[in-house]
Amino acid sequence: MQYEDLIATAPEERVRLITLNRPAVRNALRTHTLAEIAAVLDEAADDPNTGAVVITGSEKYFAAGADLHEMADKGPIELLTDPRPKLWKRIAAFPKPLIAAVSGYAFGAGCELVMHADIVIASESARFGVPEINLGIIPGAGGTQRLARVVGKSRAMQMVLSGEPIDGATALQCGLASEVQPPAETLQRAITLARTIAAKAPLALRTAKEAVLLAEEAPLSAALNAERTAFVVLAASQDRQEGISAFLEKRPARFQGR
């Protein structure tokens, strides 16, 4: 399909790539952009030939924030009925691995989009920030809650209250990113990692993602029970039998998602 605000490609087998493409506004995320991202992810979720998705911007900017031209004139009633929260929920509900390859600025809604990813590969040029305080507002798409859960209270408070960004090395140190790469290698590293992940058993991938995300939301005892239940359920899958057989026979596994 052709999209207006992004480019959707398949650079590797079982891997989809979403490239934000609004260069005139530094990839600012308007409602239409979020709708297109959600549409690609919905399609990828239903596609058995897609195992993982990478989302990226340009080398200069991942996404500079929300589109303020779209948001400036909206009052409380318009914001109450704004479709954006539902679009963010669709993005958050994507059941397969989502990897963000981030170069340049990821500010405001761009940083919130990064935090919807499961793995973040940051460029040495990356800058992460939630500068909404400079506009007299606060983050509105999970920026305070997800950030505090990822980087801890003190770092989140500093970023939210000052509006000052952090670089890729600091993002790695505080857990917002899992790797830092040279700018020219960031996207390819994310695609290579996505290819590796997409080759794993689909049911196990989905279940593993759910289990790790549950660690942020549930008490430890409940999360451990959920993990054990998922572990037991996967014992009934053909992929589990194939994985064990392949290991014992010293051959690559051929997972079918069953």
Image (spheres, rainbow, N blue to C red):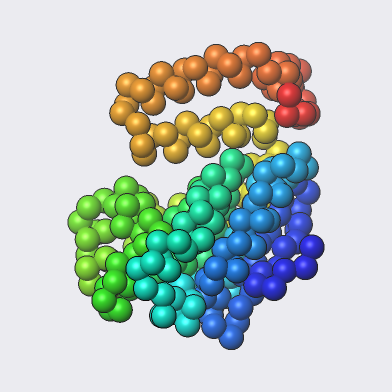
Q: Is residue 34 above or below residue 21?
A: above
State the quadrant of the C terminus: top right
Image coords of residue 61 (percent x, y): 52, 76
Q: Is residue 235 left or right of 217 when viewed as pictured? A: right
In the current view of this chain or complex, which residue is farthest to the bottom? 24
Q: Is residue 84 left or right of 9 when viewed as pictured? A: left
Q: Is residue 117 left or right of 7 when viewed as pictured? A: left
The answer to whether residue 104 of the structure is visible from this angle is no
Q: Nearer the viewer, residue 141 or 105?
A: 141
Q: Is residue 199 above or below residue 41?
A: above
Please tell me which residue is depicted at 43% across the width and 68% down the height of the picture. 78
Please tell me which residue is depicted at 55% across the width and 68% down the height of the picture. 31
Image coords of residue 165 (percent x, y): 33, 71
Image coords of residue 147 (percent x, y): 34, 55
The answer to whether residue 150 of the structure is visible from this angle is yes
State the quadrant of the N terminus: bottom right
In the current view of this chain or complex, which residue is farthest to the front? 77
Picture quarter containing residue 206? top right
Please tell me which residue is depicted at 71% across the width and 49% down the height of the picture. 43
